[in-house]
Structures are given as structure tokens and as C-alpha cells.
Amino acid sequence: MGGLTLAKALLNDGGHVQVRLYEAWDDWKVRGGALGLAAGARVLQRLGLGMELAAISNQNQGMRYYAEGKELNSASIPGDFVMRPDLQRIVVESLPAETIKLGHKLVDIVEDQDEVRLSFENGVTDSADVVVASDGIHSFVRQKVFGADQPVYTGYRVLYSVSSKPIRPDPTMASMHWLQADGTGFAVLDVTAGKGEGRHDICAVILGSQEAVTDRWDSTIVRERFAELAREAAPNHEVLRRSVESADVCFDWGVYQQPVRASWISNHGRVVLLGDAAHATAPFMGQGANMAMHDAWCLSRVLLNEDLSLREGLRLYEASRKSYCESVVSASSKVGKMHTATGLQALGRNFLLKPLLLWNLRKTWAVDPTERNPWETEPSSLQRLGLRLRALCA
């Protein structure tokens, strides 16, 4: 989604830049199920896709929190929950067909001070002034240009079900249940994505695991394991029980994050990282896609600013995004630890840390990438209030 959003943002300017979007697969595929959009939704609205987003998304209003079956409280955290294929489709359909090059698997990339040269498996070659690597957690460009490293296993796994049959009583509110079984902490999240015929109900079980499960969404179908864990973790959880019975597909997903890089910009300043290629994160704050789309908006602003050189623009992009994204990655892993806490730590989470967790989530989900340009100073609290009031009035 980061690369698609960047292409859309650059082309929306009126065409004074040339954009080519290379995709390794022969057709559009997706991994995973649902996405919760906040910052990403605000970007799409600014790009003229607000109506298309509204047509495919469930406007979730917040989250209810439970511990051992008892409701603790609820939090207002609005967001647009969509299925990944639908979200991808509306952005792809908004792009000129000639911009997209499917079936182009990158096999070599070389940069110098003047350009970047690309070679693809199908024999095609190309050159560009700047290449944006939005090719995910296993980024070929990151490994080739920035030096080899490997995603780091966080110690968490998520068993995840997707059901096209409605199994949740209230699609307007997500639910998080914190549970313990045999000394092990679990969290069960259920949420609705999409609407109408495109509605899907999602149920995910979060747990700690020493086994470094693969992070490739399409590698494992684990309906039996999901059913076993549901019986073990939450035998009285009605939505989880229904999800076992009616799931169209189940995934067993190991959670990984990227090692921190000193810079997202290559030595010659013509290759830059974006999204998961730069800062893949645990999903426990719901910010992976949001950060990638925020990256795309920020990078588009500096690339379209003719008063900035390429080097100045990329440095400004990195300064605007790198420390913030790395702080979210760190916070998300800490939230994973909270979700799977047991004993006294669980009690502390339920009654002491929960307000901090909710405050952090609200703050993060309220981020609006379009409030200011990267070269503008951050508005004061009073200015931010004025901007929000103006947006409400509009």
C-alpha cells in the first residue's frame, strides 16, 4: 500500500513527474486480511478517494476491553476497517494503466551519482532519478543496496481467522479480551472489516511463542491449530467459537520487525526505503499500513517541491518520519508484551497501564499526515485545536 499510495500522490499533482510502479507478481495479490486505517484514511481522502474508501470500509467507532470475561471499559478510537484486496483495488483502479508494470521481478539494482539502473528477471532494464523501495519486510532493494540483514522475530505469533459469514453482534465496536490459561497469557481481538457483501469478521488470538513461525501469510493453513488454541485459551468466547466454525481461512503468523537502520537513504542519495522495507512492525498498535501510507504522503510532498533538491527532500523525509516510526515500532512490541501478560503483570495492565495504553492508541490513531508539509514547523497545541475545529466545521 505504501508504493501504491506514493504513486497516486505523485500523479495527483498533474503529471510533472514520471512514475513507474514495478510489481514482481503477474497479477495483483495480497497477503493477510483486514487493515484498520486512520492516518491512511486521511491520506486517501486528500487524494480524492474518500468516497471509494467509504464504500468498502466499516467505520469502526472504538474498542471494548475485557479481562477474564469482565468488561473493563471502552475507548473511542474511530477508524476505517477494510479488507486488503478491496483497499488495493480502489487505489490500483485510480492509477493510469501505463504506470503499472506487472510481472517485473527485480534481480539487480545499481546506482551512481547520476541515476539508478534496474534489471528485471524478464530481461527488461530501466533507469530512474530515484527509486523508492516499497517492497516489504523482505525487501530485495534493502538487502542489495543497504546491506544484508534479516527481520527479527518478536517472540509473538497471531492465529488469525477471516469469515465472510457475520459472526459478531456489533460491527461498530472491536473487542479485546485479555485471558490466561495454564499460566499463559492470551489476547483475543475481534473486529469487522468491510461492509455489505464485502463484510468480513476477523478474530485473532495473540500469544507469545519461542517458535519462530514464518511471517509469510500464505504459507500455512492451520484450521486445526486455531480450533485447538480457541478451546485452550477461551472456551467461553462466543465470537471465537463461531470463528472456528465459520472461518473461510486461518493463518498462523509469526510477528517480525525490521532491525533499525542508520539511514533509509542510500550512499548516492538516489534510493530510499518506505513502509515495511524501512520499519516493519508488530501489529499491536494497528500502524503498519498507516505508517507506510503516511511515509508515502510525506515523500510525495518533498519530491514534488521544486524548491528542494533531491538530497534535501530525502533528508527532510527521513527527518520527518524515521524517529517517529521507530518509536511506534518500539511501542508496538511493548503492547504485545502487555497483551500476553500474566499474574501480577496482568493485574497491573488491567488497572494501571491500561489508561496509558489507551492514551497512546488514541494519540497515534489521531495523527493526520495532511495537516502540514514536512518543511513546516509542527503546529502548537492551540493551532492543532484550530485545525481540528476547522475540519469539523467543513
Image: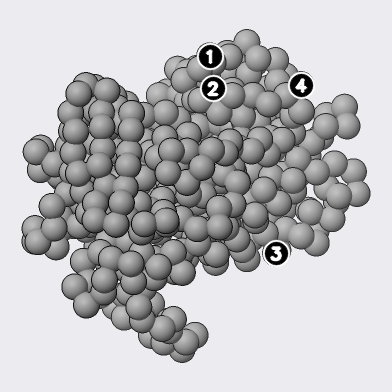
| Amino acid under disc 1 | Ile
- Quarter of the image containing the C terminus? bottom left
Graded by Cα atoms within 10 Å as few (under 14), some (14 to 19) or many (20 or more), the crowding at tag 4 reads few
Q: Quadrant of residue 363?
A: bottom right
Q: Which comes before the other along the chain, label 1 or label 3?
A: 1
Residue at which label 1 appears: 221
Query: Disc 1, disc 3: CB below 8 Å?
Result: no
Graded by Cα atoms within 10 Å as few (under 14), some (14 to 19) or many (20 or more), the crowding at tag 3 reads few
Q: Which comes before the other along the chain, label 1 or label 4?
A: 1
Residue at which label 3 appears: 356
Query: How far, Cα to Cα, is label 4 from label 3?
Result: 29 Å
Helix, strand or loop status at disc 3: helix
Residue at which label 4 appears: 232
Q: Which comes before the other along the chain, label 2 or label 3?
A: 2
Graded by Cα atoms within 10 Å as few (under 14), some (14 to 19) or many (20 or more), the crowding at tag 1 reads few
Query: How far, Cα to Cα, is label 1 from label 4?
Result: 19 Å
Q: Which comes before the other along the chain, label 4 or label 3?
A: 4
Please name which of the two marks, 2 or 3, marks the residue nearer to the observer: 2
Closer to us: 148 or 301: 148
Q: Which comes before the other along the chain, label 2 or label 4?
A: 4
